Image (cartoon, helix red, strand yellow):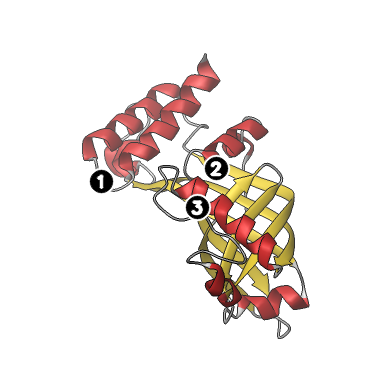
């Protein structure tokens, strides 16, 4: 992923916080023995230097991970299309503005540990339920009793041990602050899907850089 200096994370805490703020759905990518990429959308739990997830046993990605456990998890969100006229600088005509996309993306590269032990799978699933469903309402996942233990054979767990992270926050940080704020205000007024979230990220970056 191309990351210009002005689009890079301000520090590791920025991308880590972005992940823990509810950006927990991405695409797991691995390469099978025939050198074909396998891309699997998946919910996950980011846990410091690990990523926890599970998938159904028939999933074709297992063949890829068994062949080569190296993998990449790609997460993209808080994105919006920015029309050209919004990005016109100074006294230039509105038609000269260059359209672009604003988005945040984190790519986590690491090695996948496949989890087949029933107790370990139960613990992994329980951790995911506690993350995604903190209000409760679902029975505890255990390996040997309860409503879910017979279902464990139908899934496999994955722990991705993260070895590197690439983060990109593309929100026009190379543009004058007044233009950045103007674009954010236009997003708020347009109020389309993800416009508010995109504006929030843009203003957060702007305020942090200028404070």
What distance separates the C-alpha of mark 2 from that of mark 1?
A: 22 Å
> Which image quarter holds the N terminus?
bottom right
Q: Which residue is mark 3?
A: 129
What distance separates the C-alpha of mark 3 from that of mark 2?
A: 17 Å
Q: Which residue is mark 1?
A: 192
Badge 1 element: loop
- Dot placed on the residue nearer the N-terminal end, 2 or 1: 2
Task: Name the quadrant containing residue 32.
Answer: bottom right
Density class for disc 3 (Cα within 10 Å; few <14, some 14-19, many ≥20) is some
Badge 3 element: helix
Q: Nearer the viewer, mark 2 or mark 1?
A: 2
103 or 176: nearer the viewer:
103
Could you tell me residue 201's position as x and y percent?
44, 34
Density class for disc 2 (Cα within 10 Å; few <14, some 14-19, many ≥20) is some
97 or 23: nearer the viewer:
23
Density class for disc 1 (Cα within 10 Å; few <14, some 14-19, many ≥20) is few
Lateral position of residue 119 relative to residue 195, left or right:
right
């Amino acid at each position: 992923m191309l990351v210009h200096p002005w689009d890079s994370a301000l520090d590791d805490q920025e991308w880590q916080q972005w992940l823990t703020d509810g950006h927990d759905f991405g695409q797991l990518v691995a390469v099978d023995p025939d050198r074909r990429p396998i891309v699997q959308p998946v919910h996950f739990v980011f846990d410091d230097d690990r990523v926890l997830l599970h998938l159904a046993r028939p999933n074709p990605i297992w063949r890829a991970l068994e062949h080569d456990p190296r993998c990449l998890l790609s997460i993209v969100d808080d994105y919006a299309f920015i029309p050209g006229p919004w990005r016109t600088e100074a006294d230039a005509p509105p038609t000269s503005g260059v359209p672009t996309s604003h988005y945040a993306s984190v790519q986590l590269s690491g090695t996948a540990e496949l989890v087949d032990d029933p107790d370990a799978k139960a613990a992994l699933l329980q951790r995911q339920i506690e993350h995604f469903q903190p209000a409760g309402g679902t029975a505890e996942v255990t390996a040997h009793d309860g409503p879910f233990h017979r279902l464990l054979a139908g899934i496999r767990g994955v722990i991705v041990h993260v070895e590197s992270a690439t983060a990109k926050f593309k929100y026009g940080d190379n543009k004058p602050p007044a233009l950045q704020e103007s674009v954010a205000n236009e997003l708020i007024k347009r109020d389309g899907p993800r416009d508010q979230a995109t504006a929030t990220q843009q203003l957060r970056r702007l305020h942090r850089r200028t404070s």
